[in-house]
Amino acid sequence: MSAAEPRTIVLFRHAKADWPQVTDHERPLADRGRKDAAEAGRRLLDTGVAVDLALCSTATRTRETWKLAVHEFPHRPKTIYEERIYEASPGELIALLNETPDDVGNLLLVGHNPGVHALAEILAGSAEADAGGRMNRRGFPAAAFAVLSFEGPWKSLEPRVATLRDYWAPSD
C-alpha cells in the first residue's frame, strides 16, 4: 500500500462496564455491555471496513469488548494491546496513530472516553450524510464507533484531515 492511498480509522469506545470492587483498569463489562459489544461487531462488519490492525487498550473492559466484537468478523485482524491508550488524551492518541506502519490501510482503535470521542471530533474536518449530526446528538456512548477516512501516510494524521464517514451507537 502506498502512503498516498486512502486510510480508514475506526474509533470504538468500549461497551458498558460494570462497577465491582476492582481498580478502574480491571472493570469488566456489564451484561448489557456484552450484548452491545457483539452488536457493535455486527455493525462494524456492515460498514465494509476490512480491519488490518486493531489497537486495543489493556483495560479489561476494552479487551472484553474487542473479543466479543471481533467474534463477528470473518477473520481476526492482527491485534496489539497497547497500554498507552488507557486514559490517553486526543493528542497522545494521534501520536500513537502516527506510529502506524504505512502498509496498514484500515486501523481500529478500542479505547475510552473522553479521549475517543474528542479524537473523533478533532480529526473530522468534514462529515458525510448525517454521521456528524448523529454523533453530535448522541455523543459517544458505550459501544459507539466512528469511521473516519483520510489520505496520506499515518505520520500525516492531524486535526481536521479526516472525513467522518459513519457513526453508530447502540439504540441508533
Image (cartoon, rainbow, N blue to C red):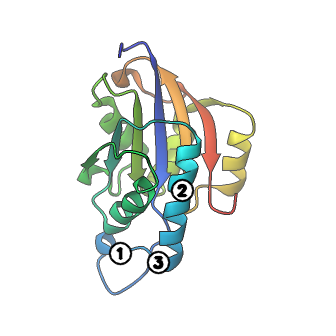
- Could you tell me residue 51's position as x and y percent? 41, 38
Q: Is residue 129 left or right of residue 84?
A: right
Q: Earlier in the sequence, mark 1 or mark 2?
A: 1
- Could you tell me residue 85's position as x and y percent? 32, 51
Residue at 28 percent of width and 46 percent of height: 79
Q: Residues within 10 Å of mark 2 (few under 14, many from 20)?
A: many
Q: Which mark is residue 27?
A: 1
Say whether marks 1 and 2 touch (CB < 8 Å): no
Given residues 147 and 132, the one toward you in this image is 147
| SS label for mark 1 | loop
C-alpha gap between disc 1 and disc 3: 9 Å
Amino acid type for the residue under numbered disc 1: Arg
Say whether marks 3 and 2 touch (CB < 8 Å): no
Q: Which mark is residue 129?
A: none
Q: Is residue 50 left or right of residue 27?
A: right
Q: Nearer the viewer, mark 1 or mark 2?
A: 2
Q: Nearer the viewer, mark 3 or mark 2?
A: 2
Amino acid type for the residue under numbered disc 2: Ala
Is residue 62 shown above or below 148? below
Q: Which mark is residue 40?
A: 2
C-alpha gap between disc 3 and disc 2: 15 Å
Which residue lies under the disc numbered 3? 30
Circle count: 3
Given residues 160 and 10, the one toward you in this image is 10
Q: Residues within 10 Å of mark 3 (few under 14, many from 20)?
A: some
Quarter residue 64 falls in: bottom left
Q: Residues within 10 Å of mark 1 (few under 14, many from 20)?
A: some
